[in-house]
Image: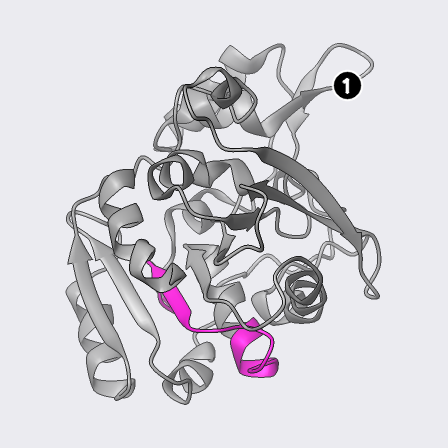
Amino acid sequence: MPLTTSATAEEFADLVNAPVIQRRWVTVATGGHVGGVFWHTRKPALVLLHDAGSSARAWDEVLLALDRPAVALDLPGHGRSSRRGRGDYRPRRLAAALEETVRSFAPGGVPVVGLGYGALAAIALKAKFPHSAGRLVLVDALPGALSPGLRLWPTPSPVFAGREEAATWLDGRGAADAARTAELETEQAADGTWAWRHHLGSLPPDAPTVLDDETLWQQLASLPAPLLIRTDGGPLDTASVARFGADVPDGEIVTIEATPSALADTLRPLTH
């Protein structure tokens, strides 16, 4: 699903009636800091979590179309958020840091929207801290159904001579929008080489490498009114969607076109 745009968040400032876009960080008790990209100046009405190997910037085009106050987070080990020395990024292990971040950035229990791996982190967050997060919204992801990001990561990744080489490497692994991902998610080292901003391409040898968590189904089934948004032609198979319908009695399923504007239209009613 093409959730990014050819314009960067900073370039949106050149648009007519462009939203105010700011980065902020919070230091969390589990160690390091978690960052977020804020859209508009009022209190966020949504919190958004990205897929594995991505960052808050994955939501740019959706949030531009949405035109509502929101904050997209960089998950731990991604974007501008701190890496974890042990490299443990299992969804359940992210819950405490995300709760502290959500409580700081968007208090009051606003809806939390998770894409791919971020959806698994959102389930863990809502299950462990039910009052810190509002309605749970899952986009193209369910426990045990590998998201596009998790199909790529974690994996040992080489360093690259430039971003074009990184894009070619990603493209060879079947990544969607490889050039855009390489542009946003790589950084240059002092020796001139380029590597991923996120930690998943260079995890320590003893770090957990299975980031999916099918046991989150039990938590998901107990949550109030979770919303599953699936896109036409998206990664979710019919068996996973059928299981959601059967095992999550309070859940709702919506199918939309795989466009940022369609997702924005579906999210907009949640911001009132």
Q: Nearer the viewer, residue 2 or 264?
A: 264
Residue 206, image x, y percentages: 74, 57
Point out the stretch of residues depicted in magenta. Answer: 125-144
Residue lying at 55% horizontally and 73% vertically, measured from the top left: 109
Quarter assignment of residue 66? top left
185 is higher (above) or lower (below) than 96: above
66 is higher (above) or lower (below) than 242: above
53 left or right, relative to 150: right
Magenta stretch: helix, strand or loop mostly: loop
**Is disc 1 placed on a helix, strand or loop?**
loop
Q: Nearer the viewer, residue 83 or 223?
A: 223
Q: Mark 1 belongs to which amino acid?
A: Ala
Quarter assignment of residue 190? top right
Q: Is residue 55 visible?
A: no
Residue 116, image x, y percentages: 41, 54
Residue behind mark 1: 189
